[in-house]
Each structure stands twice: as C-alpha cells, then as structure tokens.
Image: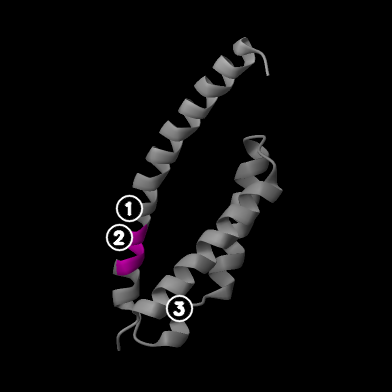
Amino acid sequence: MSPIKRKKLNKLRSQLDKLDNSFIKLVKKRTQLVKKVLELKDYKNQIVDKKRIKFILNQIKKKSLKNKIDPKITKRIWKNMIWSYIDFEKRNFKK
C-alpha cells in the first residue's frame, strides 16, 4: 500500500473509531431504556414479542431503503441487537 493510501486509510479508521464511540453511548442509553421496559414485565414470557419484532424489522427495512442503505445490513444489525437484548432481559428478569 502506498504512503498516500495508508494515510487515507488511517484517517478513515479514525473516523470509524469516533463513530464507534458515539455508538457505544447510544447502546448505553438503549440498555437503560430496556431495563426500564423489563421492570414493567410481570412474566418471563412477555420478553419476546414476535409481533413487535416483525414491526421493528419492517420499519428498519423501509428506513434503510429510504436512506439508500443496504437493508440486509440493517436487518442483520437490528436482529442481532434485538436478540441480544432479549437474552439480556432473560438473564435479568427477576419476578
């Protein structure tokens, strides 16, 4: 790789690192909200809401297409996030 390309690569990686830092803060906020949602659930079987999951994924697809983002990428990200939080809720359910 040429020095010029190396420099451009490092700059782009730095921008990605900054975005990752912002994303971590958003994940923290989302986790705090999920904890509050979990407190409202009386039974463990209320954790997985397939209707809501389907709705969310459909909305993400629409927003992705509108914003010219590959919907396969966003669907995969959101599915992983949703199921990660479902796992989090199951591990933290106390009733």
Q: x, y percentage for residue 60? A: 59, 51
Front-lying residue, 57 or 70: 70
Determine the CA span between mark 2 and mark 1: 5 Å
User: Which residue corresponds to mark 1?
Assistant: 29
Q: Is residue 54 left or right of residue 82?
A: right
Q: In the image, is residue 82 part of the stretch drawn in magenta? A: no
Q: Earlier in the sequence, mark 3 or mark 1?
A: 1
State which quarter of the image contains the C terminus. Answer: bottom left
* Residue 18 vertical placement versus 45 (above, below): above
Range covered by the magenta-colored residues: 31-35
Which kind of residue does numbered mark 1 sit on?
Lys
Q: Secondary structure at mark 2?
A: helix
How many residues crowd mark 2 within 10 Å: few (<14), some (14–19), many (20+)? few
Which colouring convention does the figure follow? one colour
Pointer 2 with pointer 1, Cβ within 8 A:
yes
User: Which residue corresponds to mark 3?
Assistant: 47
Secondary structure mostly seen in magenta is: helix
Which kind of residue does numbered mark 3 sit on?
Ile
Q: x, y percentage for residue 9? A: 58, 22
Front-lying residue, 43 or 76: 76
State which quarter of the image contains the N terminus. Answer: top right
Pointer 2 with pointer 3, Cβ within 8 A:
no
Q: Residue at x 34, y 86 (%)?
A: 42
Q: Residue at x 60, y 44 (%)?
A: 63
User: Which residue corresponds to mark 2?
Assistant: 32
Q: Earlier in the sequence, mark 2 or mark 3?
A: 2
Q: Secondary structure at mark 1?
A: helix
Determine the CA span between mark 3 and mark 1: 19 Å
Q: Residue at x 52, y 75 (%)?
A: 49
Q: Residue at x 62, y 35 (%)?
A: 67
Using the rendered view, name the quadrant where residue 46 is placed: bottom left
